[in-house]
Protein backbone atom coordinates (compact mmCIF):
# COMPACT_ATOMS: atom_id res chain seq x y z
CA UNK A 1 0.00 0.00 0.00
CA UNK A 2 1.43 3.43 -0.90
CA UNK A 3 0.38 6.72 0.69
CA UNK A 4 -2.65 7.21 -1.55
CA UNK A 5 -3.72 3.62 -2.23
CA UNK A 6 -6.11 2.62 0.52
CA UNK A 7 -7.81 -0.18 -1.38
CA UNK A 8 -8.45 -3.40 0.51
CA UNK A 9 -8.30 -6.35 -1.89
CA UNK A 10 -10.01 -9.58 -0.86
CA UNK A 11 -9.75 -11.93 -3.84
CA UNK A 12 -11.43 -10.09 -6.69
CA UNK A 13 -13.23 -7.73 -4.33
CA UNK A 14 -11.88 -4.20 -3.90
CA UNK A 15 -12.99 -2.04 -0.98
CA UNK A 16 -12.02 1.47 0.06
CA UNK A 17 -10.46 1.10 3.53
CA UNK A 18 -10.18 4.76 4.53
CA UNK A 19 -13.51 5.86 5.95
CA UNK A 20 -12.64 9.51 5.32
CA UNK A 21 -13.39 8.59 1.68
CA UNK A 22 -16.70 6.85 2.40
CA UNK A 23 -20.06 8.44 1.64
CA UNK A 24 -22.46 9.15 4.51
CA UNK A 25 -24.54 6.20 3.34
CA UNK A 26 -21.53 3.86 3.51
CA UNK A 27 -20.65 5.14 6.98
CA UNK A 28 -24.23 4.59 8.16
CA UNK A 29 -24.25 1.09 6.64
CA UNK A 30 -21.00 0.20 8.41
CA UNK A 31 -22.34 1.50 11.73
CA UNK A 32 -25.59 -0.42 11.27
CA UNK A 33 -23.84 -3.70 10.37
CA UNK A 34 -21.68 -3.59 13.54
CA UNK A 35 -24.51 -2.49 15.86
CA UNK A 36 -27.10 -4.92 14.43
CA UNK A 37 -24.46 -7.68 14.39
CA UNK A 38 -23.79 -7.29 18.08
CA UNK A 39 -27.53 -7.13 18.87
CA UNK A 40 -27.98 -10.47 17.04
CA UNK A 41 -25.12 -11.95 19.06
CA UNK A 42 -26.76 -10.80 22.31
CA UNK A 43 -30.06 -12.28 21.14
CA UNK A 44 -28.37 -15.68 20.65
CA UNK A 45 -26.66 -15.39 24.05
CA UNK A 46 -29.99 -14.64 25.75
CA UNK A 47 -31.51 -17.77 24.19
CA UNK A 48 -28.50 -19.78 25.40
CA UNK A 49 -28.93 -18.23 28.86
CA UNK A 50 -32.59 -19.32 29.03
CA UNK A 51 -31.61 -22.87 28.01
CA UNK A 52 -28.76 -23.24 30.55
CA UNK A 53 -29.74 -24.91 33.79
CA UNK A 54 -26.53 -24.66 35.83
CA UNK A 55 -26.94 -21.31 37.61
CA UNK A 56 -24.85 -19.17 39.96
CA UNK A 57 -26.80 -18.64 43.20
CA UNK A 58 -27.73 -15.02 43.99
CA UNK A 59 -25.58 -13.61 46.76
CA UNK A 60 -25.63 -9.85 46.09
CA UNK A 61 -28.68 -7.62 45.68
CA UNK A 62 -29.95 -7.50 42.11
CA UNK A 63 -30.61 -4.13 40.45
CA UNK A 64 -34.19 -4.94 39.49
CA UNK A 65 -35.12 -1.87 37.43
CA UNK A 66 -32.92 0.02 34.99
CA UNK A 67 -33.47 3.78 34.86
CA UNK A 68 -33.04 6.26 31.99
CA UNK A 69 -29.34 6.79 32.83
CA UNK A 70 -28.70 3.03 32.67
CA UNK A 71 -30.30 2.73 29.23
CA UNK A 72 -28.58 5.92 27.99
CA UNK A 73 -25.19 4.48 29.01
CA UNK A 74 -25.96 1.02 27.56
CA UNK A 75 -26.97 2.42 24.16
CA UNK A 76 -24.27 5.08 24.02
CA UNK A 77 -21.73 2.33 24.71
CA UNK A 78 -23.19 -0.08 22.15
CA UNK A 79 -23.26 2.68 19.53
CA UNK A 80 -19.60 3.47 20.24
CA UNK A 81 -18.41 -0.06 19.36
CA UNK A 82 -18.16 0.60 15.56
CA UNK A 83 -15.62 3.34 16.31
CA UNK A 84 -13.19 0.90 17.94
CA UNK A 85 -14.05 -1.73 15.31
CA UNK A 86 -13.01 0.63 12.55
CA UNK A 87 -9.80 1.76 14.27
CA UNK A 88 -8.87 -1.88 14.90
CA UNK A 89 -9.47 -2.63 11.22
CA UNK A 90 -7.46 0.41 10.16
CA UNK A 91 -4.56 -0.58 12.40
CA UNK A 92 -4.60 -4.14 10.99
CA UNK A 93 -4.82 -2.77 7.44
CA UNK A 94 -2.29 0.04 7.54
CA UNK A 95 0.32 -0.70 10.22
CA UNK A 96 2.18 -3.52 8.46
CA UNK A 97 2.23 -5.35 11.84
CA UNK A 98 -0.48 -7.85 10.85
CA UNK A 99 -0.38 -10.40 8.05
CA UNK A 100 -3.43 -10.84 5.80
CA UNK A 101 -2.00 -13.64 3.64
CA UNK A 102 -3.90 -16.94 3.70
CA UNK A 103 -0.65 -18.90 3.29
CA UNK A 104 0.69 -17.33 6.53
CA UNK A 105 -2.05 -18.87 8.72
CA UNK A 106 -0.53 -20.98 11.50
CA UNK A 107 -1.36 -22.05 15.04
CA UNK A 108 0.85 -19.46 16.77
CA UNK A 109 -0.35 -16.43 14.78
CA UNK A 110 -4.05 -17.34 15.19
CA UNK A 111 -4.86 -19.31 18.38
CA UNK A 112 -1.57 -18.38 20.04
CA UNK A 113 -2.17 -14.72 19.22
CA UNK A 114 -5.70 -14.82 20.67
CA UNK A 115 -4.44 -16.27 23.98
CA UNK A 116 -1.65 -13.65 24.03
CA UNK A 117 -4.21 -10.85 23.43
CA UNK A 118 -6.24 -11.92 26.48
CA UNK A 119 -3.13 -12.08 28.66
CA UNK A 120 -1.92 -8.64 27.52
CA UNK A 121 -5.44 -7.18 27.77
CA UNK A 122 -5.81 -8.25 31.40
CA UNK A 123 -2.24 -7.22 32.19
CA UNK A 124 -3.42 -3.63 31.57
CA UNK A 125 -7.07 -4.07 32.56
CA UNK A 126 -6.40 -5.30 36.12
CA UNK A 127 -4.50 -2.15 37.27
CA UNK A 128 -6.98 0.04 35.34
CA UNK A 129 -9.92 -1.67 37.07
CA UNK A 130 -8.16 -1.47 40.47
CA UNK A 131 -7.57 2.27 39.84
CA UNK A 132 -11.31 2.73 39.18
CA UNK A 133 -11.87 1.31 42.66
CA UNK A 134 -9.58 3.89 44.35
CA UNK A 135 -11.80 5.65 46.86
CA UNK A 136 -11.35 9.16 45.36
CA UNK A 137 -12.01 7.94 41.79
CA UNK A 138 -14.70 5.31 42.36
CA UNK A 139 -17.77 7.58 42.74
CA UNK A 140 -17.06 9.39 39.44
CA UNK A 141 -16.89 6.45 37.03
CA UNK A 142 -17.06 2.84 38.22
CA UNK A 143 -19.71 3.17 40.93
CA UNK A 144 -22.39 3.15 38.24
CA UNK A 145 -21.46 -0.40 37.15
CA UNK A 146 -21.40 -1.61 40.77
CA UNK A 147 -24.96 -0.52 41.52
CA UNK A 148 -25.64 -4.00 40.17
CA UNK A 149 -24.43 -6.53 42.79
CA UNK A 150 -25.92 -9.59 41.05
CA UNK A 151 -25.76 -9.17 37.25
CA UNK A 152 -28.17 -11.29 35.21
CA UNK A 153 -28.97 -9.44 31.96
CA UNK A 154 -25.82 -10.47 30.07
CA UNK A 155 -24.58 -7.78 27.74
CA UNK A 156 -27.05 -5.20 29.05
CA UNK A 157 -25.51 -5.43 32.54
CA UNK A 158 -22.01 -5.69 31.01
CA UNK A 159 -22.53 -2.51 28.95
CA UNK A 160 -24.12 -0.65 31.83
CA UNK A 161 -20.92 1.20 32.67
CA UNK A 162 -19.85 4.83 32.56
CA UNK A 163 -18.90 5.60 28.91
CA UNK A 164 -15.36 6.62 29.90
CA UNK A 165 -14.77 3.18 31.38
CA UNK A 166 -16.45 1.45 28.43
CA UNK A 167 -14.61 3.29 25.66
CA UNK A 168 -11.21 2.89 27.37
CA UNK A 169 -11.97 -0.82 27.85
CA UNK A 170 -12.85 -1.12 24.14
CA UNK A 171 -9.70 0.61 22.94
CA UNK A 172 -7.63 -1.57 25.26
CA UNK A 173 -8.35 -4.36 22.74
CA UNK A 174 -6.44 -2.34 20.16
CA UNK A 175 -3.56 -1.80 22.61
CA UNK A 176 -3.44 -5.56 23.33
CA UNK A 177 -3.25 -6.42 19.63
CA UNK A 178 -0.58 -3.75 18.98
CA UNK A 179 1.56 -4.99 21.91
CA UNK A 180 1.38 -8.64 20.79
CA UNK A 181 2.17 -7.53 17.21
CA UNK A 182 5.50 -6.13 18.47
CA UNK A 183 6.46 -9.62 19.67
CA UNK A 184 5.37 -11.68 16.64
CA UNK A 185 3.19 -11.15 13.58
CA UNK A 186 -0.44 -12.14 14.19
CA UNK A 187 -2.72 -13.17 11.36
CA UNK A 188 -5.65 -10.80 10.84
CA UNK A 189 -8.15 -13.61 11.51
CA UNK A 190 -7.05 -13.62 15.18
CA UNK A 191 -8.46 -10.10 15.69
CA UNK A 192 -12.21 -10.71 15.07
CA UNK A 193 -11.91 -13.94 17.10
CA UNK A 194 -10.39 -11.97 20.01
CA UNK A 195 -13.00 -9.20 19.90
CA UNK A 196 -16.04 -11.46 19.34
CA UNK A 197 -15.10 -14.12 21.91
CA UNK A 198 -14.15 -11.31 24.30
CA UNK A 199 -17.58 -9.73 23.87
CA UNK A 200 -19.19 -13.11 24.53
CA UNK A 201 -17.07 -13.71 27.66
CA UNK A 202 -17.78 -10.22 29.07
CA UNK A 203 -21.51 -10.80 28.44
CA UNK A 204 -21.46 -14.30 30.03
CA UNK A 205 -19.75 -12.75 33.07
CA UNK A 206 -22.95 -10.76 33.64
CA UNK A 207 -25.41 -13.67 33.50
CA UNK A 208 -26.33 -16.25 36.15
CA UNK A 209 -24.92 -19.04 33.96
CA UNK A 210 -22.30 -21.10 35.77
CA UNK A 211 -19.75 -21.68 32.98
CA UNK A 212 -16.10 -22.54 33.33
CA UNK A 213 -13.07 -23.31 31.17
CA UNK A 214 -10.61 -24.60 33.80
CA UNK A 215 -7.60 -22.30 34.42
CA UNK A 216 -8.88 -19.81 31.82
CA UNK A 217 -12.39 -18.49 32.32
CA UNK A 218 -15.08 -18.77 35.00
CA UNK A 219 -18.28 -16.69 35.12
CA UNK A 220 -18.39 -17.01 38.92
CA UNK A 221 -15.23 -14.91 39.33
CA UNK A 222 -16.67 -11.66 37.94
CA UNK A 223 -20.00 -12.31 39.64
CA UNK A 224 -18.10 -12.46 42.93
CA UNK A 225 -16.37 -9.16 42.06
CA UNK A 226 -19.80 -7.50 41.84
CA UNK A 227 -20.50 -8.77 45.35
CA UNK A 228 -17.00 -8.37 46.87
CA UNK A 229 -15.30 -5.54 44.89
CA UNK A 230 -11.83 -6.11 46.43
CA UNK A 231 -11.30 -9.36 44.47
CA UNK A 232 -11.18 -10.60 40.85
CA UNK A 233 -10.31 -7.46 38.88
CA UNK A 234 -9.65 -9.36 35.63
CA UNK A 235 -11.95 -8.84 32.66
CA UNK A 236 -11.40 -12.19 30.91
CA UNK A 237 -8.92 -14.32 32.83
CA UNK A 238 -7.93 -14.42 36.48
CA UNK A 239 -4.20 -14.92 35.84
CA UNK A 240 -3.13 -11.58 37.28
CA UNK A 241 -5.51 -11.72 40.24
CA UNK A 242 -3.86 -15.03 41.11
CA UNK A 243 -0.42 -13.41 40.69
CA UNK A 244 -1.32 -10.33 42.77
CA UNK A 245 -3.24 -12.23 45.45
CA UNK A 246 -6.60 -10.62 44.67
CA UNK A 247 -8.20 -13.81 43.30
CA UNK A 248 -11.08 -15.26 45.25
CA UNK A 249 -12.97 -18.41 44.22
CA UNK A 250 -15.89 -18.26 46.64
CA UNK A 251 -17.59 -16.28 49.38
CA UNK A 252 -16.08 -18.49 52.06
CA UNK A 253 -12.30 -18.04 52.44
CA UNK A 254 -12.24 -20.71 55.20
CA UNK A 255 -13.53 -23.31 52.72
CA UNK A 256 -11.00 -22.22 50.10
CA UNK A 257 -8.19 -22.89 52.58
CA UNK A 258 -9.56 -26.35 53.30
CA UNK A 259 -9.66 -27.19 49.57
CA UNK A 260 -6.13 -25.86 49.00
ZN1 LIG B 1 -19.20 -6.27 35.79
ZN1 LIG C 1 -15.24 -3.25 39.69
Image: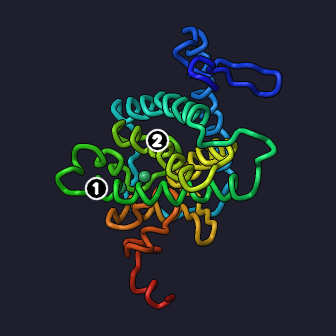
Residue 98 place in picture, x, y as percent: 63, 42
Q: Colour scheme of this structure image? A: rainbow
Q: Dividing the picture into quarters, in which one does residue 75 lie?
A: top left
As drawn, is 54 to the left or to the right of 179? right
Question: Distance between the Cα atoms at labels 2 and 1?
Answer: 17 Å
Q: Which quarter of the rendered picture does the N terminus lie within?
A: top right
Secondary structure at numbered mark 2: helix
As drawn, is 52 to the left or to the right of 18? right
Q: Is residue 219 above or below residue 44?
A: below
Q: Are marks 2 and 1 in contact (CB under 8 Å)?
A: no
Tally of numbered tags: 2
Report the residue marked by disc 2: 170
Residue 32 place in picture, x, y as percent: 59, 21
Report the residue marked by disc 1: 131
Residue at image location 39% in from the left, 81% down from the top: 253
Residue closest to the far bottom? 258
Amino acid sequence: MNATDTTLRVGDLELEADWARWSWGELAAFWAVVVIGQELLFFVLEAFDRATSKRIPYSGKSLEVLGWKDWAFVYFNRLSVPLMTYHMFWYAFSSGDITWKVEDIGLLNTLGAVVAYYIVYDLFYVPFHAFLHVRAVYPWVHKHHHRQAAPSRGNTDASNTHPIEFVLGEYLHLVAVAVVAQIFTPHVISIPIFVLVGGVMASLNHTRMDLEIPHFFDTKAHDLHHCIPTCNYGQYIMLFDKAYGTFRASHKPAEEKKVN
